[in-house]
Amino acid sequence: MQALEGIRVVDLTTGVAGPHCTKLLADFGADVIKVEPPGGDPTRNVRPFAGDVPHPERGLLFLHLNTNKRSVTIDAETEDGLELLLGLIEQADVVVEDFDPGDAEELGFGYEQVSANRPELIYCSITPWGQNGPYVDLGFRASDIVLQGMGGPVAATGSPDREPLKLGGSLALMQAGLVGAWSVAMTLLRVEADGEGDHIDVSVHETQMGSRDRRTTSLTTYAYQGTPSSRRGGVAGLVLGGGAQPCLDGYVNITAIGPKIHQFVEMIGMGHLSGDERLMQPPLTLDPAFVEEISTAYLAWSMSRTKREALIEAQSYGMLSGVINTPEDLVNDPVFRGREVFEEIEHPVAGTFEYPSRPLLMGETPRQPASRAPLLGEHNAEVLTELLGVSAEDLPLLKGVGAI
Amino acid sequence: MGNLPLEGVRVADITVVWAGPHVTQLLAEWGAEVIRVEPRTRIQPATRGAERRPPTPEELQAMAAQGVTLAGFPDFVGRPDPWNRGASFNSHGRNKLSMTADITTPEGREAFLDLIEHCDVVVENNVPETIEKAGITYDVLSKRNPKLIMLRMPGFGLNGEYKNYRGFGLHMEAVIGHTHVRSYPDDIIEAAGDVVTSDAIAGIQGAFAVSMALRHVRKTGRGQLLEQPLAEAFLPIIGEFLLDYTANGRNTDPQGNRHRTHAPHNYYPCRGEGDYIAIDCDSDEAWMAICEFLGADDLLANEEWMTAAGRYRDQVALDEALGDHTSRFDQRALFFGLQAAGVIAGPVQNEAAAYACPQLAERGFFEETGNTSTGTHLYPGLNLRMANTPNHIRTGPPLLGEHNEYVYREVMGYTEEQYRALEEIEQIGFGYAPGVAPFAEE
């Protein structure tokens, strides 16, 4: 069996956070029915496109985030559409939604409405600020770059000499989606034990504020010392030689933390310093001339090696290290390929190419090969017939009144 | 009012540094009984933050002045027991218990195996060879407890050339391409600094995996091994860039703060020293609203910038011109003013701003907790809520060895004699064994 086999999810989300949540549920075996508004999830039209041809079935972000799902188009603002949607929700174990707080209630499928006779329902809401609070009352809008800046470690990311730097892609939204998937999976344990569902409230803002990318540690330090983080120090500020280091063909990053610093100076040909007490001091408190001496030797060492050579040597000294890859480097890396972290998926419109396959391996519940993201409304007939007993004759009728 | 969903689940925690402890933090927050199994006969690097002498108050002040806050202590004081006082450990330690046993010694290993019989889950994120040398791989543990779930989080996997490669989150994301794609488009890569986002992702991903495996145990009675390499768990998070290569052969350039289509989309300087505001312009109407709010007639006059395509094409010049305007405004005025005009905008908040954030305050994000060494402070709270299951931090970060009595005697059922025997050989004790942390007595 697959890990989430037997779980049905009605997915009312668009964009990145919600679809990432339901992708994870679908990839591990849940039956996810993606209910799209008649025009489709807007992410279908987000760049980049397969073959660089703009088309709602070619958006790569969409294709990535919607594997293993079924798509139905329902206009919940029509009377017939709402009835269909409520029918689907009745058949579901989980609802995931990302409407502005209050909007789902207004449309007739808020948590209180759909859980009244079904306490076992899990209803997961993923929104920028959560379900309440002054920014919700004020109707504030948000997006990934804003939520990273307000909640995440942005103030401490990048160069002190210029504007701060966000994290890659849609990091905050992806992370919040992952929190959503986790919250659903653990609540399922309780539902299956004693029938008690819940209304889960994921605030992207708070998933960043509670993030282990330096944020919770920096917040705790602030509570302890009253000192905020900045772009001056960072992780590299803790160790001599930390940060990106140029090599013949790219960059390596070596972190000689704690006593490893003595092996580090040996490695870069400064063995006479090994054992020197000064090496154990925080680098920012060292004599700049001493730091300069080590930096110069480190640069001479790294610039006479390829990044791979530098990495292998650093690892042989037991040093925490990694090379800085481009996407091309990674996809072609034989070790990653050997572990099958990519899988080929066919798609009738977008074509056939490789996708990232899985975040982990489960020994007893191996993940099955993914099926591609659905075409818009591809499963209208299948889902409505199978779950709601809508007859073949009624389907065109529902289309006629704009319900699907 | 529901029980916490993970109530009744017991977790043995032999994690180090950040990613593994984040998994067990999340499990503990939602009801699991998490028991950290920690050596007191050696110091685990970068875990209880005391792998060398703790920084002096003067050194901590100097570091803080440079914005280095990943090794903070209450009132800048690490001594006498830095392992109980460090922000790095204490930011994830709440709700967990601490027992002492060194799994790399025969006696400590035996105690750990006894504990495993009373646990549902074990979580570890050591270099694979450490677990192999200790003789506590899944085949060994599952013989003692077939229902056991073991989550292993190596850097790169349990096989392959990189199997025993050592790294922090920052090295994993360098390898999978995150460092490259998030760098400034117009600067050297060194300027991007180091981040450890893969620790954050791996922590949540691990809690998700354990929850799914618990469901499987309840249905089938079978535990399992979960293999979740840090690098592989993070890789799908930047999937669209990898797909752009596999589908289109495009090797994405550094993106920095750029959006796929929106411009302006960046952090812009405000009047206050070091203040920045995020602005994300998602429509032509938003562009006009931004210009009108700023009174920026010169920006409005540029016809090229009236369309999304024009703004995107010219975003370097546009960012600079817009920054000239925003830098005349107070951050808060920009935030509330732009939002009132329907523009997506928000302040870059450092920790001081986070603790003062009205949204977090009303939601009760920060919670007071602590232990006898640190006293009480306001800590970052839960990263999700359940409407029918009010939840809070229950206990503060555990002192090293604080729960030995409870775990050995009540959970494992050790006799007085067994307990004393382990005390005598320094397996059981409070704090580090004599000589392990000499700085404590300096």
Image (cartoon, helix red, strand yellow):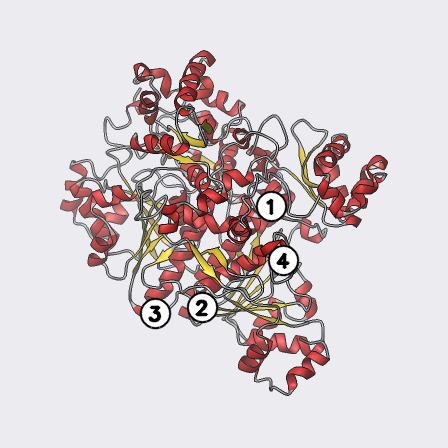
Residue A79 position (above or below residue A258): below
- Of residues B166 and A140, which is closer to you in this image? B166
Q: Is residue B231 visible?
A: yes
Q: Amino acid at mark 2?
A: Val
SS label for mark 2:
helix
Q: Where is mark 1, residue-wise?
A: B360
User: Which chain hosts label 2?
Assistant: A
Q: Nearer the viewer, mark 2 or mark 4?
A: 4
How many angstroms separate mark 3 from mark 2 (CA)? 13 Å
SS label for mark 3:
helix
Q: Amino acid at mark 1?
A: Leu
Residue at figure coordinates x 16%, y 43% from the top left: B107
Residue at figure coordinates x 50%, y 28% from the top left: B68
Q: Where is mark 3, residue-wise?
A: B219
Residue at mark 4 shares a chain with residue at mark 1: no
Marked residue nearer the N-terminal end (2 or 4) = 4
Q: Amino acid at mark 4?
A: Thr
Q: Are marks 3 and 1 in contact (CB under 8 Å)?
A: no
Q: Amino acid at mark 3?
A: Lys
Q: Are marks 2 and 1 in contact (CB under 8 Å)?
A: no
Q: Where is mark 4, residue-wise?
A: A43
Q: Where is mark 2, residue-wise?
A: A191
